[in-house]
């Protein structure tokens, strides 16, 4: 049997142009934005703790130890979990029980999460416990941070979670010297990975097994990664749409400020300004069409609707990063409160909404791609080849986008409306937020390919106009970036590498960064 490889998956190209790349250190308890999380997950930024975080954690741990001495009944500490809440755990069994929680909750299956997803989850685990409501030891947090800083990446299967617990259990198991993890490019026994990294495993004590797996941390991590990439993509889509509008001689009166001000949607107004700034300096073609097709004149409205949804998701997810989603809550007032901040409704619903927003952004992009390739509406050679008939040119590029759109539509069915009772009806409602967040990452990546296809087509089309039209400084710079690795298709050639290069330019944030260098920030 072959050894499983580390999954490349999402984030194989680092966002070198993302604002996250300027973060130099991540400190739980300080202002933690999506950019900070991405800096840790994708850019390997170091994690450290400030004195305020240490004080919160140590105060919470002292309370927990006091409650144990007082023999209070505490969920998951002196009682079982789930429906076993009615069963008391003896003092002699308490430590072993916390280890058992980790072992028996390792129930996710299938291919493992990719490296950045695991690292993001580990960081959110630190944020959750570092809020000071979990009763965990500071030593435990420090060793989890050491795993991040020394690049010990637990093997965590990606399927089979209704909300949290299972993914986190696989990660936490490595912290105790068991399970499996990558270190130095090898998949190793967890204990060996920790040994090579110079980290002594943790022996979980009261409360720690449960708090390591609680708190919808994997959902928040995956949702945050998806939201970060979606935020990059919606601005990138404005740039790519502008390239298409330029080459198709669109009537820019559709973007007139007077039209935009008549509709009270600030995101729509912002995108119209982006388009006009990007096309500033382009040849003035006049008004070739009194009214363009919807895929051209509706860019501010369609992109604006997607942007509004993405901004909502970013706001919600950043709130989650600043929250304690544990259960029970060890409150500084001296009370232990069982509740359910671990519910992932906020993240689940926003992740489903991200899928819909990405579908909306993709469907108008696919239509613009078709218009670029269709000689009957473009005024350009069929399928953007100078020698049609013996060459297919970009004919199949639109087929690719159509297939991607079909997949996006399937994945855009909401997961958060589903619920299957678990735990002998103690958990008679579950968020299914993990499935929502997981597919949000998939959908964003598929949408990046759809926009990348439009980018390739727009740059190819521009070369047929080069003798008659002057491009704007932005679109000229975008075309130069594409041509670094995707040559003009005079005769048919192997197109797949061109598509992957276009996707890399989109995903990395480079397309957006080129535009921002000239027109200013687009977030």
Image (cartoon, helix red, strand yellow):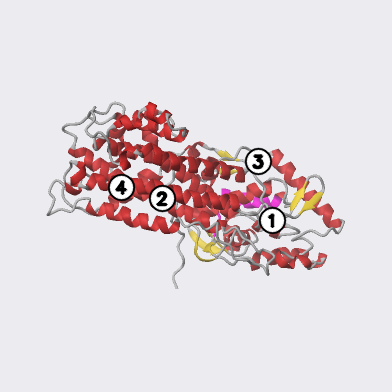
Q: Going from the N terminus, do you reach mark 2 or mark 3 first?
A: 3
Point out the tag, 3 or 1, that comes first from the N-terminus: 3
Residue at 53 percent of width and 52 percent of height: 222
Please state which of the two labelled residues, at mark 3 or mark 4, is closer to the viewer.
Answer: 4
Residue density around tag 3, few if under 14, some if 14–19, many if 20 or more, within 10 Å: many
Which mark is on residue 359? Answer: 2
The reply to whether discs 3 and 4 touch (Cβ–Cβ < 8 Å) is: no
* Relative vertical location of residue 324 with respect to residue 112 in this rendering, above or below: above
Q: Say which of 65 and 245 sits in front.
A: 245
Q: Which residue is mark 3?
A: 29
Which segment did they paint magenta?
139-154
What residue is disc 4 on? 367
Of the 4 image quadrants, the one containing the N terminus is bottom left
Badge 1, how many Cα within 10 Å: few under 14, some, many 20+?
many
Mark 1, secondary structure of its residue: helix
Contact between labelled residues 1 and 3, with CB atoms less than 8 Å apart: no
**Mark 2 secondary-structure assignment:** helix
Q: Nearer the viewer, mark 2 or mark 3?
A: 2
| Apparent side of residue 356 relative to residue 404 in the rendered image (left or right) | right
Tell me where residue 127 appears, x and y as whole percent. Answer: 64, 47
Residue at the disc numbered 1 = 211
Q: Quadrant of residue 94?
A: bottom right
Expressed as whole percent of the image width and height from the top left, the position of residue 469 reads 20, 31
State the SS at label 3: loop
**Residue 55 x %, y %:** 74, 42
Q: Is residue 511 visible?
A: no
| Disc nearer the start of the sequence (3/4) | 3
Question: Farthest residue toward the right?
Answer: 70
Determine the residue positioned at 22% across, 47% down: 373
Q: In the rendering, at what x and y percent does residue 252 appear?
A: 30, 31
| Figure check: 373 above or below 435 | above
């Amino acid at each position: 049997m072959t050894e499983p490889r580390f999954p490349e998956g999402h984030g194989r190209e680092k966002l070198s142009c993302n604002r996250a790349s300027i973060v130099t250190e991540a400190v739980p308890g300080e202002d933690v934005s999506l950019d900070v999380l991405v800096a840790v997950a994708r850019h390997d930024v170091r994690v450290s703790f400030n004195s305020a975080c240490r004080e919160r954690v140590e105060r919470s741990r002292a309370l927990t130890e006091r409650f144990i001495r007082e023999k209070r009944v505490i969920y998951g500490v002196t009682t079982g979990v789930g429906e076993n809440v009615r069963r008391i755990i003896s003092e002699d069994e308490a430590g072993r029980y916390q280890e058992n929680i980790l072992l028996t909750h390792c129930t996710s299956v299938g291919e493992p999460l990719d490296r950045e997803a695991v690292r993001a989850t580990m960081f959110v685990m630190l944020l959750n416990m570092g809020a000071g409501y979990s009763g965990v030891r500071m030593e435990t947090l420090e060793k989890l941070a050491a795993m991040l800083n020394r690049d010990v990446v637990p093997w965590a299967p990606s399927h089979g979670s209704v909300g949290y617990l299972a993914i986190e259990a696989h990660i936490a198991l490595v912290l105790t010297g068991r399970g499996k993890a990558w270190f130095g490019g090898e998949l190793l026994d967890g204990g060996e990975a920790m040994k090579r990294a110079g980290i002594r495993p943790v022996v979980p004590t009261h409360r720690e097994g449960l708090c390591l797996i609680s708190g919808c941390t994997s959902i928040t991590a995956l949702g945050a990664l998806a939201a970060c990439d979606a935020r990059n993509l919606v601005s990138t889509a404005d740039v790519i749409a502008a390239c298409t509008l330029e080459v198709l001689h669109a009537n820019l009166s559709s973007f007139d400020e007077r039209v935009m001000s008549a509709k009270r949607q600030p995101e729509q107004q912002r995108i119209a300004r982006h388009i006009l700034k990007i096309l500033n300096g382009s040849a003035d073609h006049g008004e070739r069409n009194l009214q363009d097709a919807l895929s051209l004149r509706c860019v501010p409205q369609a992109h604006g609707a997607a942007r509004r949804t993405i901004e909502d998701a970013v706001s919600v997810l950043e709130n989650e990063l600043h929250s304690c989603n544990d259960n029970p809550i060890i409150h500084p007032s001296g009370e232990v409160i069982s509740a359910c901040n671990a519910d992932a409704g906020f993240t689940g619903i926003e992740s489903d909404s991200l899928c819909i927003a990405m579908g909306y952004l993709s469907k108008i992009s696919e239509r613009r791609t078709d218009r670029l390739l269709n000689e009957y509406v473009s005024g350009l050679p069929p399928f953007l080849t100078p020698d049609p008939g013996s060459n297919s040119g970009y004919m199949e590029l639109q087929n690719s986008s159509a297939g991607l759109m079909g997949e996006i539509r399937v994945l855009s069915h909401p997961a958060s409306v589903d619920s299957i009772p678990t735990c002998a009806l103690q958990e008679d409602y579950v968020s299914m937020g993990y499935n929502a967040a997981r597919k949000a990452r998939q959908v964003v990546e598929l949408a990046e390919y759809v926009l990348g296809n439009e980018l390739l087509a727009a740059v190819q089309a521009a070369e047929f106009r080069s003798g008659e039209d002057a491009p704007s400084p932005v679109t000229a710079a975008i075309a130069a970036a594409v041509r670094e690795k995707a040559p003009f298709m005079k005769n048919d050639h192997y197109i797949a590498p061109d598509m992957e290069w276009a996707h890399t330019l989109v995903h990395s944030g480079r397309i957006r960064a080129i535009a921002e260098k000239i027109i200013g920030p687009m977030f």
